[in-house]
Amino acid sequence: MKYKVMVVEDESQIRDIVAKYLERAGFDVIGAKDGFEGLASFEAFQPHLVVLDVMMPGISGFDVLREIRHISEVPVIMLTAKQEEVDRLKGFDMGADDYVSKPFSPRELVRRIEAVIRRVYKARGEKEVLTCGALELNLTKHTLRKSGQDIEITSKEFNLLRVFFMNQDQLLTREQLIQDAFGPEYDGFDRNVDSYIKKIRQKIETNTRRPKYLRTKYGAGYIFGGTVNDD
């Protein structure tokens, strides 16, 4: 498959060089000139990995990483001109997967990207696709299908579905869903989960009033899976 990489870098020359080397290596690449553009494009592009510059105008790479971690566990490699250990440790504590210091070799960066992708995605093997009835959730492509037909989902919906697919037939509270899908730093209201689940139901259920896949346990939480009849 063709993996997607987003390069968030305010220096156009560096951004273009990195993109060129990645495209030569077989990646699908999108560039963003700053953190705001990167965050705006993240959900639509749904990259498998993000290359993220630390020092950018407007919003720093650390701030962008924090926002990404609210909605996704996608691997992130940080680019930095700083050498201080404290900066690298800060990035790792926030969820960065690797660091590359400027100036760097584009070939080495490509190799590091390939190594992270092998570790994160290809190691999953047979667990790349999770199933429930006629539903298939692809953990690598971040896609959902029902009876072979693609269903468009957002990154937040994917994160929730991933938790549901991995915990079929188990009662999950809103607090558990927030923790497992969005992380402890999620600053939304717990009732937002109800809104996301309503949208998921509209996409996967034939009759939302009598859901077969995603059921509400009133006063307790949600149960996904069980005996599913898709006829």
Image (cartoon, rainbow, N blue to C red):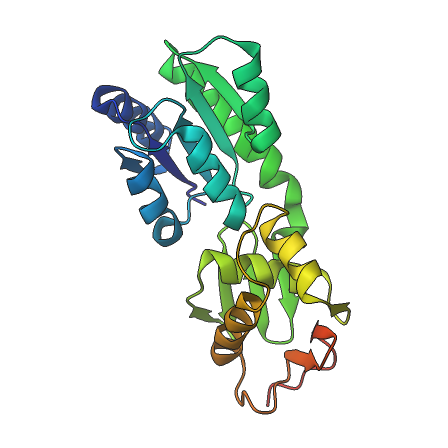
Q: Is residue 165 visible?
A: no
Q: Position of residue 45 (x, y in %)?
A: 36, 49
Q: Is residue 122 left or right of residue 45?
A: right
Which residue is found at the position 32% from the left and 24% from the top? 18
Q: Quadrant of the C terminus?
A: bottom right
Q: Position of residue 131 (x, y in %)?
A: 64, 66
Snapshot quadrant of residue 166: bottom right
Q: Residue furthest left?
A: 12
Q: Residue furthest right?
A: 170
- Which of 144/40 is in front? 40
Q: Quadrant of the N terminus?
A: top left
Q: Position of residue 123 (x, y in %)?
A: 65, 39
Q: Is residue 144 left or right of residue 54?
A: right
Which residue is found at the position 70% from the left and 73% from the top? 221
Q: Is residue 91 above or below residue 137?
A: above
- Which of 183/165 is in front? 183
Q: Position of residue 222 (x, y in %)?
A: 69, 74
